[in-house]
Image (cartoon, rainbow, N blue to C red):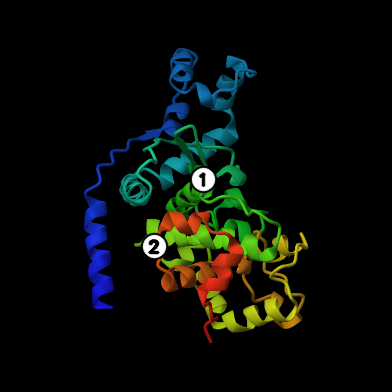
Amino acid sequence: MIWSCAKENRIEKEIAQIPVQIGIERFDRIFADVTPENLTDVKERYPFLFPERDADSVWIQKTKDTIQLEINQEVEKAFSNFSEEKEQLTSLLQHIKYYFPEVTVPRVITVTSNVDYQRKVILSDNLLIISLDTYLGADHHFYNGMQSYLKAHFVRSQIIPDVASMYTRQLVELPRNRTFLANMIYYGKELYLKDLFLPNFSDNQKIAYKEEQLAWARANEEEIWRYFIDRQLLYSTDAELLPRFLYPGPFSKFYLEEIDQEAPDRIGQYIGWKIVSSYMKNNNVSLRQLLLTDAETIFNTSKYKPAR
């Protein structure tokens, strides 16, 4: 343990020395101040945010829209200061570049998106776009009528883990086959990368669980694993297993009345995370080797045993 801690401290010191400079472009504020006189200049600076199909009049009208004005007000109230997120983004990118030096530092832009929760964070063409109106807090009135499991993720503390997720999705190949195990390992690889990229974040933030949801997963890990094994789910290609155990939802669907209302969604991701972590602990392989290794090999050599 002493040797491991010393190694981790050495790595963190090396990571802290990696030069990363980011600027935060507050397009949400820029758009709030758009006028007919400066719209052309703004469009020239941010052409990727203005679809050509829309006439200038559409954007001018949008700036006057009462809903947009309220969004501007609420975002400014919540994010008058973005310095903490800037520091966290810098640290995240330092960690990513330590393990993957080829990753470039993106242009970071904050926007509003009419609460487009399916595109909270976009990472594309070296652009990182963050929709601040999807992080105003689970109880914000903008989210009234949305399902609770969605609103739980609309919190400020989830911004950096969501950004990290976008990077892991670019680094981890999609499953090579359709088995439940392959899909679990795919998500397990992503979460293992988040362990490395976000050492100062809690496990529940990495997987986007509440603390009590992660506690339930830990307390019931053995029973979850037994359920998967007893029903021979690992090598099943039943597509219904993915929404039941891997995709966001109100809960994981065991079809057991005493469990379903307590089990957090995406429980298969959690098990995949544990398998990949066990594989890396028990095998002398590099991070890049992990990403290239197939799910069955990882599982067979992981020596994974569910926590009791």
Q: Is 252 positioned to the left or the right of 25 in the image?
A: right
Q: Nearer the viewer, mark 1 or mark 2?
A: 1
Up-down relation of residue 131 to residue 56 (above or below)? below
Residue 269 in view (yes/no): no
Mark 1 = which residue? Answer: 170
Q: Quadrant of the N terminus?
A: bottom left
Mark 2 = which residue? Answer: 201
Up-down relation of residue 210 to residue 101 (above or below)? below
Q: Position of residue 262 (x, y in %)?
A: 65, 76
Pointers 1 and 2 in contact (C-beta within 8 Å)? no
Q: Earlier in the sequence, mark 1 or mark 2?
A: 1
At 35% across and 62% down in the image, what residue appears?
Answer: 199
Q: Position of residue 264 (x, y in %)?
A: 62, 70
Give the residue type at disc 1. Answer: Gln
Give the structural element (helix, strand or loop) at label 1: helix
At 64% across and 78% down in the image, what residue appears?
Answer: 224
At 75% across and 79% down in the image, what residue appears?
Answer: 256
Count residues near mark 2 (Cα–Cα under 10 Å), then give few for <14, some for 14-19, many for 20+: some
Q: Which mark is residue 93?
A: none
**Could you give the CA–CA distance between mark 1 and mark 2, rounded to whole angstroms?**
21 Å
Up-down relation of residue 228 to residue 154 (above or below)? below
Q: How many marks?
A: 2
Q: Position of residue 85 (x, y in %)?
A: 36, 48
Give the residue type at disc 2. Answer: Phe
Count residues near mark 1 (Cα–Cα under 10 Å), then give few for <14, some for 14-19, many for 20+: few
> Which is nearer the eye, 301 or 256?
301
